[in-house]
Amino acid sequence: MIDDARIDVIVQQVMAELRQGERVRHGPQPELPVIIHPPAPSAPLRHGDNLFPDVDSAVAAANQAYRQLYDMPLSVLERMVSHIRRVSRENAQLLAHEAWQETGMGRYEDKIEKNLLNANKAAGTEILKPTSWTGDDGLTLVEYAPYGVIGSIIPSTNATSTVICNTIGMVAAGNAVIFNAHPGAKACSNHAVQLMNEAIVEAGGPANLVCAISKPTIETAQQIMRHPGVKLLTVTGGEGVVREAMKSGKRAICAGPGNPPVVVDETADLDQAGRGIVRGASFDNNIICTDEKEVFAVASIADELKRQMCRHGAIEIDNQQLNGLMKSIFKQIPPPGTPGLMNIAFIGKNASVLLKEIGIEVGDEIRLVLAEVERDHPLVWTEQMMPIIPLVRVSNADEGIDLAKEAERGFRHTAVMYSKNLDNLSRMARVIECSIFVKNGPSFAGVGYGGEGFCSFTIASPTGEGITNPISFSRIRRCVLKDHFRIV
Ligand code: NAD
């Protein structure tokens, strides 16, 4: 049993390392303790500033800010991005707590990590490298230009971390942004937008370069989609919002749902796989789109894999217990082999809350419920967004890969494989066709958490931008000087 003082010491260490980017470089080493301590009291949420009552006034203000920025030196833009990162780090804990309290989903300590990860590792201006060609015919220059005002529709599940990564990426490319939060997460998301605005103003940038709708709804999201002053859309959410954005007639960067499968073959390091699956599938209680959602394990190692998962914080339930739990966690249990609608009351809740439904009392150190099922079990086909993971036994890696492809349901979002067999890894990489494919690590390594590369929580698979960054939010413009300026 860890006492409160010890927890505080560990959390402070982790936070200090994250602030310096250390944990991000080396990956998540120690198991995080369960912490429920609230941060220092929040500054009262001010209304006004960069929150607008309607879409027209938000677009007008954002457009004015965009025009002001266009005339400012690049150094201001770079300073803005570095202030946004600092303010996001300083408020990572506060925003995590607000999101956790308001949405009732996920784990507070994981939300802190999500905020810090995006503050530290979302790509900034450094990624926008101009290209040039010179020759007998002169000089041609290609640069990344802003779109103008971007409409960004954001989810409840990453309510503050999406504000951080989208602000960094969109502002680094010189754009203004109007955020439309999920109605169930508007206070924390809008507070994050206010903090981004403050950081920009502090850095000498224009007020309202990022702004938000004070009382966002689905209707205001749709008004943003249709507004002539909004030049680019970025939507992060489920199938409904993606469908709506694609009908808008505008270019839309669509970050839709996923159902990330994991394949584990007989050559895998099972300790690594067991630990990685539990860490990945339970990260923020499975509400992140990249989190592992089902496992296909080769039969010869399935028992040992389950043992390893339980050693690393999972608890296995049997078929009868699962049948009892299904009545609670599904709104309506769908037919075999099809996805269903989950019961919102259990989305993002701790494993202990799920287990209580079937009379099992555990502490919050249990991160994940594990259930072995047949391949057509609805949990395999549903994006469950709660810490329960189905495991299906397969006879070999090929069968696992083929089933993973089916269970991923064509989202082309994220997939994971644990194997030491290069042929198997290569086959899955080609077959699965996902924006993110992680080998021998948790899915979150694919967004730079304990893996190399930049981060974003807006991962656009339907429209193909993948892990979004300032290039995704840029127009590519070419300028040609005929016959001159070659210097050799
Ligand atoms: P959601 O689809 O319910 O809501 C997302 C946003 O879209 C909200 O702001 C909501 O108000 C808006 N919205 C929903 N339907 C709309 C419509 N018809 N017209 C206009 N706006 C609409 O999603 P959620 O529950 O907040 O988030 C979870 C879902 O988002 C999961 O499916 C998850 O996989 C996905 N997600 C994907 C990514 C990614 O990067 N690909 C990141 C986070 C979440």
Image (cartoon, helix red, strand yellow):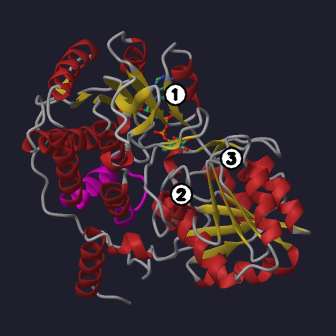
Mark drawn on residue 241: 1
Camera-near label (1 vs 3) is 1
User: Which stretch did the figure color magenta?
Assistant: 90-110
Picture quadrant of residue 355: bottom right
Is disc 1 in contact with disc 2, using a CB cutoff of under 8 Å? no
What secondary structure is the stretch in magenta mostly built from? helix
- Horizontally, is 67 left or right of 332 in the view? left
Residue 441 is situated, as x and y percent measured from the top left of the image, at 60, 71
Give how far apart the Cα atoms at labels 2 and 3 are.
12 Å
Please name the amino acid that badge 2 sits on: Asn
Q: For the C terminus, give its image quadrant.
A: top left
Q: Is residue 105 above or below residue 476?
A: below
Left or right of 304? Residue 182 is left
Q: Residue furthest front?
A: 488
**Residue located beneath label 3 in the image:** 382
Q: Is residue 105 magenta?
A: yes
Res 448 seen here: yes
How many other residues sit within 10 Å of disc 1, few (<14), some (14-19) or many (≥20)? Answer: many
Between 407 and 217, the one lying in front of the other is 407
Asked which secondary structure carries label 3, the reply is loop
Residue 26 on image: x %, y %: 42, 76
